[in-house]
Amino acid sequence: MRPRSLSAVPVAIKLLLVVALLAQLAWHAARSRMPEQTSTLSPPPSVAVLSVASMGETIWLAKALMLWLQSFDVQEGTVISFRHLDYQPLTAWLQRVLDLDPRGQYPLMAAARVYTLVPDRHKQEQMLEWIYREFPRDPERRWPWMAHAAILAKHRLGDLGLALKYSQIISDISDDTVIPGWARQMNIFMLQEVGDLAAAEMALRALLDSGTVTNPAEQRFLEAELRKTREKIATQGQ
């Protein structure tokens, strides 16, 4: 009797096996939790193991894992603050989910908008740095979370240097990538805020010369910014 291929297995059976895998993960996670309400995430399985376990339904498994991951801080009906989560394995789990579904946005959205709510600067930076590392792999889809990271760094962390780093990587993306002008221009205004007017002037001139700004109103705005920046530079040189 010839063995059946995985593709011949009904989707319902595959999903049932995936649910069983998630139930096992949840059971092991529940056993590892400390009585003092500390949520302890175990390191995730490898991508290869999860891919095999998904029976070819990697995108479905990615979505299910995110739902499980976000419910991890609930113990016996009590919501546990994210401050009790170890963000190192949390980041590893987010990475696994993204590896299973590289086109998915849920892990990056959760990192930017959910897991940065913890009142712990180090953990906030862990999430923002993970977004920064993952952004270049698919900038066309991931730019909203990189821009959000730059805004958080500036307004929530009060770190202009970090905000400049995050906005810079957006502006460095090649011109054929579909990223809105406002996201590309964030770097210019960050440079102005940190006082690097010469770099801001260069960035404005390069953006105007690139031909990517086609909206007349936006062109006039940037030209006005360039004039103001040059005037400030001239004033400082007097």
Image (cartoon, helix red, strand yellow):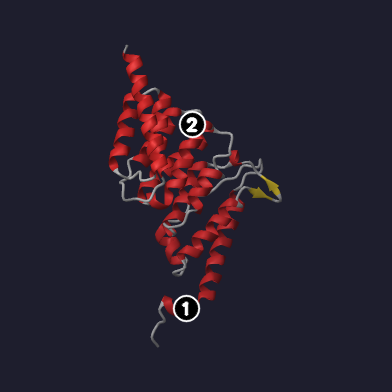
Kind of residue indicated by mark 1: Val
> Helix, strand or loop at disc 1?
loop
Residue 40 rendering spot, x and y as whole percentages? 57, 45
| Along the line of sight, the residue nearer the viewer: 185 or 142 | 185
Quadrant in the picture for residue 227: top left
Residue most extreme to the bottom: 1
- Whether residue 87 sits left or right of residue 186 in the image: it is right
Instruction: Say which residue label 1 marks.
Output: 9
Give me the residue at 53% from left, 42% from top: 86
Circles 2 and 1: CB distance less than 8 Å? no
Instruction: Say which residue label 2 marks.
Output: 154
Residue 84 rendering spot, x and y as whole percentages? 60, 40
Q: Nearer the viewer, mark 2 or mark 1?
A: 2
- Whether residue 212 sits left or right of residue 157 in the image: it is left
Residue most extreme to the right: 77
- Vertical placement of residue 112 versus 232, above or below: below
Residue 166 in view (yes/no): no
Give me the residue at 66% from left, 40% from top: 36
> Helix, strand or loop at disc 2?
helix
